[in-house]
């Protein structure tokens, strides 16, 4: 038997994929992709496929920039390949 944590990403992908793209959906997917600590230290908005991430400090900016390739893949998995094409991080 597989742990629930192995099934959760697939379930989220299934639930989110067919819903219309909205601010709430993007925010939910962001939180799922980065976890609660990063989600609390950031705000996000999607503009023409570019996810704009505002951070609360220079340290969070560095961390999010460093993890951007992994985060982008997670978001594309949750929202669809074309929904988020790049990530821009600002402090």
Image (cartoon, helix red, strand yellow):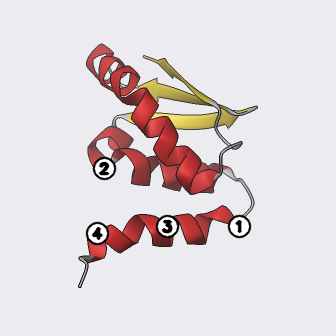
Assign a secondary structure to mark 1.
Answer: loop
Residue under the image location 23 percent in, 85 percent down: 1
Looking at the image, is 87 positioned above or below residue 81? above
Query: In the displayed structure, would residue 23 be above or below residue 90?
Result: below
Mark 4 residue element: helix
Q: Are marks 4 and 1 in contact (CB under 8 Å)?
A: no
Residue 67, percent from left and from top: 36, 29
Of the numbered discs 1 and 2, the one sitting upstream in the chain is: 1
From the image, tell me which residue sits under label 1: 18
Closer to the eye: label 3 or 2 = 3
Callout 4 crowding tier (Cα within 10 Å): few <14, some 14–19, many ≥20: few
Per the model, the C-alpha gap separating discs 4 and 1 is 22 Å
- Marked residue nearer the N-terminal end (4 or 1): 4
Distance between mark 3 and mark 4 Cα atoms: 11 Å
**In the image, is 44 to the left or to the right of 35?**
right
Nearer the camera: disc 4 or disc 2: 4
Residues under labels 4 and 2: Cα distance?
A: 16 Å
Residue 54's disc number: none
Q: Residue furthest bottom?
A: 1
Residue beneath disc 4: 5
Instruction: Measure the alpha-carbon separation of dots 1 and 2.
Output: 24 Å
Quarter of the image where the C terminus is located: top left
Residue labelled with disc 3 = 12
Q: Residue at x 70, y 66 (%)?
A: 19
Please tell me which residue lies in front, 55 or 34.
Answer: 34
Upstream in the sequence, badge 3 or badge 2?
Answer: 3
For discs 1 and 2, the disc positioned in front in the rendered view: 1
Q: Residues within 10 Å of mark 1 (few under 14, many from 20)?
A: few
Cα distance between the residues tagged 3 and 2: 16 Å
Task: Read off the residue under disc 2.
Answer: 36
């Amino acid at each position: 038997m597989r742990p629930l944590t192995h099934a959760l990403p697939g379930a989220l992908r299934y639930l989110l994929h067919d819903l219309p793209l909205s601010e709430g959906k993007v925010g939910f997917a962001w939180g799922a992709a980065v976890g609660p600590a990063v989600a609390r230290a950031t705000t996000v908005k999607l503009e023409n496929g570019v996810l704009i991430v505002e951070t609360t400090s220079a340290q969070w900016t560095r961390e999010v920039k460093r993890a951007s390739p992994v985060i982008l893949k997670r978001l594309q998995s949750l929202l669809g390949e074309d929904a988020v094409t790049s990530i821009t991080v600002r402090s």
